[in-house]
Amino acid sequence: MTQSFRLPEGGLIDRGRRLGFRFDGRDYMGCAGDTLASALLANGVHLVGRSYKYHRPRGILSAGAEEPNALIQLGEGARVEPNQRATQIELFDGLRASSQNRWPSLNFDIGAVNNRLSRFLPAGFYYKTFMWPASFWMKYEYIVRHAAGLGEAPRERDPDHYDKTFAYCDVLVVGAGATGLAAALAAGRSGARVILAEQDSVLGGSLWSGSGETIDGEPASDWIAAARTELEAMEEVTILTRTLAYGYFDHNFMALVERVTDHLGGEAGALPRQRLWKLRAKQVVLATGAIERPLVFADNDRPGIMLADACRTYVNRYAVRPGKRAVVFTNNESGHLAALDMAAAGIEVAAIVDLREDPMGPASERAEAAGLRVVPGSAVIGTRGDRRVRQVQIARLNAEGTQALAAGETLDCDLLAMSGGWNPSLHLFSQSRGKVRFDAGLGCFVPGASAQAERSAGACNGTFGLNDCLAQGFAAGQQAAKDSGVKSGRKSAAAPRAQNHDFLPARWCWEVPSDKPAGRAGKAFVDFQNDVTVNDLKLALREGYESIEHVKRYTATGMGTDQGKTGNVNAIGIVAQIQGREIPDVGVTTFRPPYTPVTFGVFAGRDVDGLLDPARKTPIHPWHEQAGAVFEDVGQWKRPWYFPKAGETMHQAVNREVKAARDSLGIMDATTLGKIDIQGKDAAEFLNRVYTNAWAKLAVGRCRYGLMLNEAGMVMDDGVTSRLGDAHYLMTTTTGNAAPVLAHLEEYLQTEWPDLDVHMTSVTDQFATVTIAGPNARALLAELAGDMDLSSESLPHMSIRDGRVAGIEARIARISFTGEMSYEINVPASCGLALWQALMTAGAKYGITPYGTEAMHVLRAEKGFIIVGQETDGSVTPIDLGMDWIVSKKKKDFIGKRSLTRPDMIKTDRKQLVGLLTDDPKEVLPEGAHLVEGAVSQTPVPMLGHVTSSYESPNLGRSIALAMIKGGRARMGQSLQAPLANGKTVACTVTGPVFLDPEGTRLND
Amino acid sequence: MLVIPCPHCGPRCEIEFSYGGQAHITRPEDPAAIDDETWADYVFMRDNTKGVFLERWVHAHGCRQWFNVARHTVTYEILASYETGAKPPKLDFETQV
């Protein structure tokens, strides 16, 4: 199709680079420099979507970020993205897009029946209708969800990748229109480190929308090019185009998203699709411009009804005629500027309908001089046309502007350009916690006092004349650089100069009067995206939603992907008018980030898949992998869970591993246990204060088990600590708790006991630890440990010695978590794999068997040893665990001691650790099962506690379980019931928690 | 996201730090000597100040040192940071609120 609405010359497009694209299955051509919207308009396409609720035909309203209507589904397959603004999508060759919210097609849409039914679909319809019965909500929700919404989310995984980066600067300038460029030039010239961020692909902002502007006597385009050249030559200045500053957070932290390769259309190569900038600026200059307001009149939403300045933009920047015959409807000077530019581009301007009684100002004077027809004191009170506006109805207003007199003439047109004034883009200012105030003269909200190191300049500050914008931007840039601490070495030139073209004077008219009573005229839309009409606002107020925040939530005005950029202030004005209040008293709703939607991928960045969380692997990991281990995650560590042989189930493998450790010899990789090296002359005193038991008398070369509490008296960790020298200890922690324990110890050391001479560091990664356990452990170690005396006299249970194992320098601790004779051999991490292999080779004669965490859990449960985090959950004291033997009565104090005597801690009905044996020895209780007394005949049944650990014990030939039961120790021998989710009830008996070798003869030997 | 002035490392981004709650809460010298209520007050109860709040931070991904910060809980402005054990700087707490 030809670009029949393309102007023969002018614009910021490259007619030599023609780009083919497809919209709704039809092929079109556009030019480099086009947006999807401008390319569609160049081909005469205005109808681009159906509205959210009524499925009304909608066209392109704007030329920028504020677009509420032209939301399209961009791309195909995995790269499809819903709700993209056609006005901001840069055209590329091969672009594929489709319209949304229509079925079966845009031209013929079944859902449009909603428009006919609209009388029955007022604001709050869904709230009111789908209330009862509550049990039906799930069904309703299904239907409502299908009826609502615009685009469709992609169903496949995002194939692109995204980056994140940090940046710091003296001055961040947001927006590179005339104001932002002046600010960046001033700040850059003073030597400041400047970042200039512009969401558009080009610098210059609204200068490209105008025609014939000059700055310092040059055409604006030349000035923009010169500014860019100068900025690019400055070493400390970075220009980020296609970069949206979408969020302003505390301490001048700004989030920006850069569209790195979107405009290349899938030719990303090694580059990321988008990049997240986390930017900290010493000073910020906001030069975010302003957004034109629509006028609110009956049937103001037909395709072909556009913002006046957008029409200018399409004509001047994109060299597109958005129509052949235009009517302009305005309450200020901007409509006249648009009319002049459209007329110059060969668009017939049928009339300028001006709400003002006596239009005056430089643009209206020019329009009059150009012979354009101006209809003053009048309004458009209705439009006709199905898929495109084709006629407008105008009427004179009474002197007060509150009523339309009898309908006057109708005008044929295919374009209606409207201007209701301007809204400064206050989003970032407001996010920075700055309070906005209403300026009655400008008819809009403007920034109040700054809350952060920030200043607004130009149109976003309520300054609309070009010369004033340049002066204000320049001054803001200079001041920001100075305030950032930069000492200017150069004398800056004066601010650029230009002519002012204000949009004032204006006549504010929030709801354009109609000649028909309310409800009889067509729908007058306030919020196009959410299909909110004036009548919806009135209904909300009638129903008692008085606060503007409530009106927003009831009607959905200001919600959605555009967040009310075009509609909010009109809604506030209309609410104020109906309530008879002043606009400042109505207030504004909260501006929230992001400014326009940001894709989730950019927040994920590279932190996906294997990079989501670091995987920690021991030096022996490759061996486990080769042996076919199944791994489980413990914290960030990958630990072998069990080592199945060919054809073995998990159950069989674990039973084999457990038996091997009891009957002959097991070997386990214990490298992941946290290891903290503690040194200093007060180390023993320190341990005394952080563990519940006594440490002063622990001899060098001996080990002791310790229980660590928090100040509330609850168990937070356990482990064995060994005394390596007079003032040297090695503490071990549970695998998942190593970092929190070290942090806990550091906190007390630094903040409570800075007088103690203690130093700590993590040595978890420096050592590999291999545990060998079982009756043949000593024999194996003896073979590899040279002449080291391993007798119980020389190396008794709970002692540690330096030596060599298989020729490797090693620290050998005789400690046991299995209840078997057991050694933990620590070697430098780099020797871990060699040690493991040496042990495996020499241990072959004993049938040495690697065991994983599951077998370890069974082995320790047979012995009634707790696992912190399994038996405990942050609400368990040592007394609850029956471990009073480890709580020193003599020590005056340790962390948590005082809490153990609080009234709640000494209640006899606290949950206590017990063992459980099911009456049927084959029945294995599920962990987490609840326990009750007696038969479950009626609910609710008082719950006594829950199963914390439960296994089949191959050594005992039956199932065993540990549980936390209210008053458990007084219930020994009592029969309890475990009602399961599947309806079955399992009977069991309370026992002590130690099932095997309660005297500990196996490990002391 | 805050910029927190570590007394040892200088201003750094909040992601390097962990929060430690209210500052200047001293662990009782002799916990056994105080009643349950006083002990519970020490363990569990903290102020919820609107205005300048003295709080603890630790430079967890930096020097690992604990220190104190005077932060305004409404504006999030950080007015001072100082080492653990030091006295808080003289601040006009009333007018800051």
Image (cartoon, grey):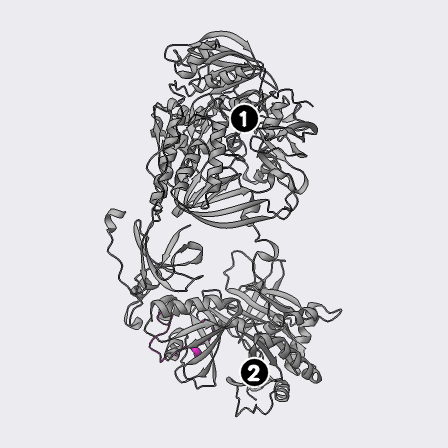
- Looking at the rendered image, the quarter that the C terminus of chain A falls into is bottom right
Place of residue A285 in the rendered image (x, y in percent of width and height, measured from the top left): 40, 39
Q: Is residue A907 above or below residue A402?
A: below
The answer to which of A353 and A964 lies nearer the viewer is A353
Which residue is under mark 1?
A317
SS class, disc 2: strand
Chain to which the residue tagged by mark 1 belongs: A
Q: Give the residue at x 35% y 49%.
A: B76
Q: Mark 2 points at which residue?
A: A809
Does the residue at mark 1 contact the one at mark 2 (Cβ under 8 Å)? no
Q: Local crowd at mark 2 within 10 Å, few (<14), some, or many (≥20)?
A: some
Is residue A221 in the magenta section?
Answer: no
Give the x, y percent position of residue A681. Answer: 37, 80
Q: In this view, does A362 lie above or below A925?
A: above
| Kind of residue sitting beneath label 1 | Arg
Q: Where is residue A243 in the image (x, y as percent from the top left)?
A: 51, 40
Q: Main secondary structure of the magenta part?
A: loop
Q: In this view, does B40 lie above or below A221?
A: below
x 57%, y 27%: residue: A51
For this rendering, which residue is in front, A448 or A903? A448
Dot 1 surroundings within 10 Å: few (below 14), some, or many (20 or more)? Answer: many
The magenta region covers A880-899
- Is residue B56 in view from this perspective? yes
Quick one: A661 or A86, which is closer to the camera?
A86
SS type, badge 1: loop
Disc 1 from disc 2: Cα separation: 76 Å
